Image (cartoon, helix red, strand yellow):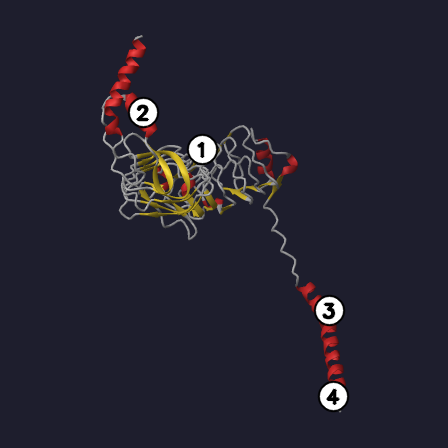
Amino acid sequence: MKKIKTINKLLSSFMLLSPLIGIGFNNSQHQSPQKNIIENSYSINDYLSSNLEPVKMGDIYVNLDETGKIIQSYSSGEGVLEVLDYVTEIATNAFEQNQKITSLDLSNATSLTTIGEASFLDCINLSGSIIINEKIKSIGVEVFGGTKISSFTLNEKNQYFSIPDNLGPNAQVLISGTDKKWIDNSLPIGDLAFGDIVIPDTVSSIAHSAFYGSKITSIDFSNASNLETINVNAFRNSSIKTIKEFEKATNLTTIESNSFASCNNLDCDLMIPANITTLKNYCFSETTVKNLIFLSETPPTTIQYKWNPTVTGKVYVPSEVAKQAYLNASNFGFKTNQVEIGLPPEPSPKKSNIGLILGLVFGLGIPIILAVTGFGIWYFTKKKKNNC
């Protein structure tokens, strides 16, 4: 009985408030957010949150929280999501796996401060460029993972993010903070990085999961002379195809666990810098490294179990002494016939097709020319006789 009375009392209170509740939420157009009518009443606020009518933003209808300022989830519609000027946050997982959104327009989202973790994860039809407005200060991990987003446009007044301009002509990385050592102090970049990345000489450490799942196509270490550490999961599951001039990272001593793991497109020779002392578990696992080249006479002092990557070619070391040292190194697991001395042979130059082309020209071309010429002479001679 007490429970029924409590429910009745709650319903009575709600009925008294119902005329006020409907004000401002019956129109799907831009509304000023409704003030919280009853404070400290979780049940009423919860009811309001779940019963607000969806608001149309561009082509997409979205659900808002009880403040009317936070986008909680997608409701219906297909096409452009245009976030309106009173929205302050896009909640975690709000549009995850939504296949109806084709583009995201933040040009009018002047109050937006937060884009929650995985909010657009696996929106496979979402493409284009994303505008990062002045007030956006927090972008969660995996926000645009699995999308076709290709670039970012940063408002020059934004003090929370930066886009470094020294990363190469085809690269773009949106990072948190403005420190020149941008990889050291950034949040995980992941899906906020694109193209061919050149590691700057200001960087000493690549952060934990910094480029996890990124759309980087290559990494160039030719300027990375001050790099010392590549941390756990740093490039894991990214789109890297090539690693360029890795040996130029002359101060690199430590490659942590899974740092390049599951880079399934990685398909190149890999030259390990001479000063490496620590290689951790699975750092090159599930890749297709062609040849692995060690520059040091002595193997790293710290090698963890199952370090050995999937090498499709050979492992090369500087000398016979080095070969025995690497074969005897704990936890490497190299086989005798797998290790060679020196460097991989230069790739065979592609065979020229000039001979084939010349053969076709002389073998077929000349006879055809002669036949056409002979036919032309015969035809005009015959025509001339007929005219006579």
Tag 4 or tag 1, which sits nearer the N-term?
1
Q: Secondary structure at mark 4?
A: helix
Residue situated in front as seen by the camera: 261 or 365: 365
Q: CA distance from mark 3 to mark 4?
A: 30 Å
Q: Amino acid at mark 1?
A: Val
Which residue does the numbered mark 1 point to in the structure image?
232
Residue shown at 32% from the left, 42% from the top = 161
Q: Residue 139 sits in which quadrant?
A: top left
Image quadrant in which the C terminus is located:
bottom right
Q: Nearer the viewer, mark 2 or mark 1?
A: 2
Q: Residue 69 sits in which quadrant?
A: top left
Residue situated in front as seen by the camera: 80 or 273: 80
Q: Secondary structure at mark 2?
A: helix
Tag 1 or tag 3, which sits nearer the N-term?
1
Question: How many residues crowd mark 1 within 10 Å: few (<14), some (14–19), many (20+)?
Answer: many
Residue shown at 29% from the left, 37% from the top = 88
Task: Find residue 263 and report its horizontal and vertical position in percent.
Answer: 52, 39
Tag 1 or tag 2, which sits nearer the N-term?
2
